[in-house]
Amino acid sequence: MISAEEKMQVENYLISKKLPLDILLEVKDHMISQIEDKIKDDKIDFEEAFSKVELSWRDNFLLTKYWFFPDMREFPNL
């Protein structure tokens, strides 16, 4: 189990990626679960587990523009 401060670190990271709230909450749960699994299975600390999980999600957070939005807003590539 990770601490409240560590959960906040994950949340702040996701907020920095400008995810919509509903997606942010879903991704947060998945990331926290993956981090806890890595800590347990790989016997590593939070920082290392967070780095590995963040790396595995990184491509999903690249912003892309969709032609069907007239203002060409950027969205995460989830």
Image (cartoon, helix red, strand yellow):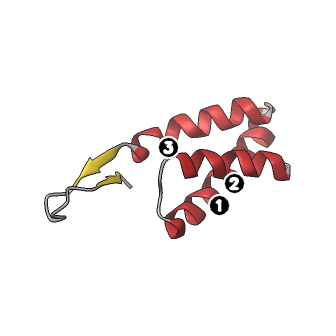
Q: Residue at x 78, y 45 (%)?
A: 6
Residue at the disc numbered 1: 29
Q: Earlier in the sequence, mark 1 or mark 3?
A: 1
Query: Quick one: SS at disc 1?
Result: helix
Crowd class of label 2 (few under 14; some 14 to 19; many from 20; radius 10 Å): some
Q: Residue at x 55, y 61 (%)?
A: 24
Residue at the disc numbered 3: 57
Which residue is nearer to you in this view: 31 or 68?
68
Q: Earlier in the sequence, mark 3 or mark 2?
A: 2
Crowd class of label 3 (few under 14; some 14 to 19; many from 20; radius 10 Å): few
73 to the left or right of 59: left
The three-letter code of the residue at mark 1 reads Asp
Evaluate whether residue 57 shows in this view: yes
Which residue is nearer to you in this view: 77 or 43?
77
The three-letter code of the residue at mark 2 reads Ser
Distance between the Cα atoms at labels 3 and 2?
13 Å
Distance between the Cα atoms at labels 1 and 3?
13 Å
Q: Quadrant of the C terminus?
A: bottom left
Q: Residue at x 40, y 40 (%)?
A: 59
